Image (tube, rainbow, N blue to C red):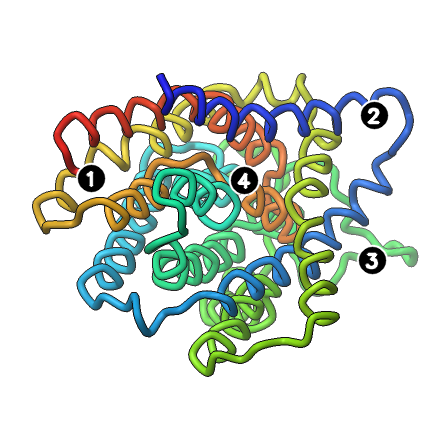
């Protein structure tokens, strides 16, 4: 019962803040312009500062465990690769694949995960080490899939009336019109996007420029060197970091479009099952077999089965992917995680593993 109450107290406020964002958007207190600007602020400033703060304050030297780090990195790679391959085989709508893949495996490790572990063990334990091992991978491979699966107007699969004629009435030289197999639709095919090498270069550049990844790697040397900031610097960093979660949740709520979300209910439900149940069912037994227990096992549970992180929407929206699908997955995983996380914790406690 205590686990259930804690799960409710941890997840329901997140959902309620999203509702607040939706309500104040409907009342006209904020508009789409505010949501877009706030979205960029969270992506480029608040989330990187939050991750920098958490990692800079962590003590990795005393907690470092090679087996634990390798497990997190290898499992993250397998999760990502498996989900992406399955979407290429089974998901027909190419424009949804990028958002679906990253929202299906990215966990709310930094925002929700450390709070869960701290509540159970009075300190964050192995959570910072899990963040170092998994979160950079989360973001790097998310950038890769989001780069390759950009929105149709930036991809070769767009079909429709997208403007391709410039003001002089001539077709842009970078695109050409071709007929599809049925011969009754025009397809805009971007010649540059057909070049996989250019997409790989673009992905590498996006990784190096990604503010969240930069925030993570900037925090590591401060942790390893045990750098202590002056009080006024700490307070400034904390003030900015504390805005990341509430602003991101308000933006998700304000940007949530129910009618569009309903049309994407099937991939939303599938991604939610994968995120909250499927990944844990596959990889938690392996973690137990490898001998992980207590704080290590709880950190792994957060990596595998916590709700989708709010940054998956922020990145999807900023990288021209399906923000509606990403926000729908975040909302549903957040709502249901109070039940699924409680069930996972009950199972682990029943067998004496945590």
* Residue on which disc 1 sits: 284
* Residue on which disc 4 sits: 95
**Label 2: how many residues lie within 10 Å, few (<14), some (14-19) or many (20+)?**
some
Q: Is residue 269 left or right of residue 312?
A: left
**Label 4: how many residues lie within 10 Å, few (<14), some (14-19) or many (20+)?**
many
Q: Viewer-proximal residue, 103 or 351?
A: 351
Q: Which dot marks residue 24? A: 2
Of the two numbered discs 2 and 4 in the rendering, the one whose residue sits closer to the viewer: 2
Q: What's the CA distance linking mark 4 and mark 1?
A: 31 Å
Helix, strand or loop status at disc 1: helix
Mark 1 vs mark 3: which is more N-terminal? 3
Residue 321, compared with residue 166, is above or below; it is above
Residue 320, compared with residue 87, is above or below; it is below
Of the two numbered discs 4 and 1 in the rendering, the one whose residue sits closer to the viewer: 1
Relative image position of residue 89 (x, y in whole percent): 32, 38
Mark 2 vs mark 4: which is more N-terminal? 2
Specify the quadrant that holds the N terminus: top left
Residue 77, compared with residue 88, is above or below; it is below
Query: Do tag 4 and tag 3 residues touch (Cβ < 8 Å)?
Result: no
Query: Do tag 3 and tag 2 residues touch (Cβ < 8 Å)?
Result: no
Q: Which dot marks residue 170? A: 3
Q: What's the CA distance linking mark 1 and mark 3?
A: 58 Å
Q: What's the CA distance linking mark 3 and mark 2?
A: 44 Å
Q: Is residue 44 left or right of residue 304?
A: right
Q: Is residue 29 left or right of residue 4?
A: right
Q: Viewer-proximal residue, 56 or 193?
A: 56
**Label 1: how many residues lie within 10 Å, few (<14), some (14-19) or many (20+)?**
some
Mark 4 vs mark 3: which is more N-terminal? 4
Query: Do tag 2 and tag 1 residues touch (Cβ < 8 Å)?
Result: no
Q: What's the CA distance linking mark 4 and mark 3?
A: 28 Å
Of the two numbered discs 3 and 2 in the rendering, the one whose residue sits closer to the viewer: 2
């Amino acid at each position: 019962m205590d686990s259930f109450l804690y799960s409710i107290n941890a997840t329901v406020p997140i959902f309620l803040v999203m509702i607040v964002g939706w309500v104040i958007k409907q009342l006209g207190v904020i508009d789409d312009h505010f949501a877009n600007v706030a979205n960029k602020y969270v992506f480029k400033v608040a989330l990187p500062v939050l991750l920098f703060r958490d990692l800079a304050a962590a003590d990795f030297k005393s907690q470092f465990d090679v087996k634990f780090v390798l497990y997190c990195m290898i499992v993250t790679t397998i999760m990502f690769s498996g989900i992406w391959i399955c979407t290429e085989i089974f998901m027909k709508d190419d424009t949804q694949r990028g958002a679906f893949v990253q929202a299906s495996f990215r966990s709310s490790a930094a925002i929700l995960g450390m709070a869960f572990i701290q509540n159970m063990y009075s300190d964050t334990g192995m959570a910072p080490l899990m963040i170092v091992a998994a979160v950079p991978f989360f973001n790097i491979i998310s950038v890769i899939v989001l780069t390759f699966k950009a929105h149709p107007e930036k991809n070769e699969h767009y079909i429709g009336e997208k403007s391709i004629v410039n003001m002089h009435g001539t077709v842009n030289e970078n695109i050409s019109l071709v007929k599809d197999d049925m011969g009754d639709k025009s397809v805009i095919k971007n010649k540059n996007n057909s070049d996989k090498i250019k997409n790989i270069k673009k992905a590498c550049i996006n990784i190096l420029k990604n503010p969240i990844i930069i925030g993570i790697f900037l925090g590591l040397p401060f942790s390893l060197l045990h750098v202590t900031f002056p009080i006024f610097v700490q307070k400034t960093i904390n003030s900015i970091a504390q805005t990341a979660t509430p602003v991101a949740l308000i933006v998700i709520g304000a940007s949530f479009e129910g009618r569009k979300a309903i049309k994407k209910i099937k991939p939303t439900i599938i991604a939610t099952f994968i995120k909250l149940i499927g990944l844990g069912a596959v990889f938690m037994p392996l973690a137990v077999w490898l001998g992980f227990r207590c704080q290590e096992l709880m950190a792994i549970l957060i990596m595998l089965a916590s709700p989708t992180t709010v940054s998956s929407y922020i990145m999807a929206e900023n990288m021209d992917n399906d923000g509606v699908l990403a926000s729908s997955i975040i909302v549903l995983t957040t709502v249901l995680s109070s039940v699924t996380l409680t069930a996972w914790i009950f199972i682990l406690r029943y067998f004496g593993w945590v």
